[in-house]
Image (cartoon, rainbow, N blue to C red):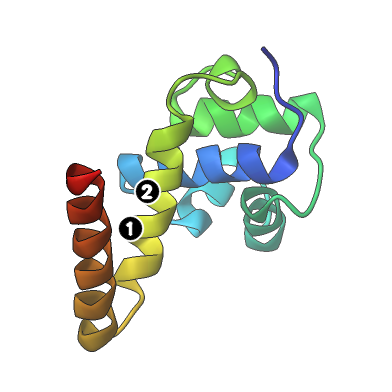
Amino acid sequence: MLISDLKLIGTKLLAIRKKAGLTQSEVAELSGLSDRTYADIERGTVNMRMETALKICNALQITPNDIVSEENDLYALEEQQILEKLRNCSIHEQKTALKIISAYLDSLKQS
């Protein structure tokens, strides 16, 4: 199934870029785009032409299918987004979030 959700495509690009160990600026440069344009694409706030998508895919060494097809990896992307949010929290906030998650998972076992 093909996806047309720009935010989901952006999220996939973010995950792929991070996995490759690249910054937004590096991908932008490799793609021949401005930093701002690539950042907007990754945020899912702008659409891109096929030519631009191909340049980005080439820079990330992926196929267009990797960013436009809905796969079973959507949960992995959501997990990565949550972990990224958690990493941006203070240590105290991280500990609190982990306690909440742990308590929730424990409650599932009791059901």
Q: Look at 70% across and 57% down and name the residue there.
A: 40
**Mark number for residue 38?**
none
Side (left or right) of 89 relative to 92: right
Which quadrant holds the N terminus?
A: top right
Residue type at mark 2 is Gln
Looking at the rendered image, the quarter that the C terminus falls into is top left
Question: Of the numbered discs in the image, which one, if any, rests on residue 80?
Answer: 2
Q: Residue at x 69, y 49 (%)?
A: 41
* Residue 97 x %, y %: 29, 72
Depicted 94 relative to depicted 77: above or below: below
Q: Residue 44: x, y in percent?
A: 70, 50
Q: Disc 1 marks which residue?
A: 83
Task: Determine the image quadrant of residue 31.
Answer: top right
Q: Position of residue 45 (x, y in %)?
A: 77, 54
Residue at 44% x, 25% y is 61
Give the class, few, some or many, for how many residues have Cα within 10 Å of label 1's Cα (few <14, many ≥20).
Answer: few
Would residue 17 be visible to someone looking at this image? no
- Would you identify the image quadrant in which residue 17 lies? top left
Residue 68 picture quarter: top right
Q: Is residue 111 visible?
A: yes
Q: Between residues 27 and 67, which one lies in front from this camera angle?
A: 67
| Nearer the observer, 30 or 67 | 67
Mark 2: secondary structure: helix
- The answer to whether marks 2 and 1 mark residues whose Cβ atoms lie closer than 8 Å is yes
Q: Residues within 10 Å of mark 2 (few under 14, many from 20)?
A: some
Going by the numbered disc 1, the residue's amino acid type is Leu
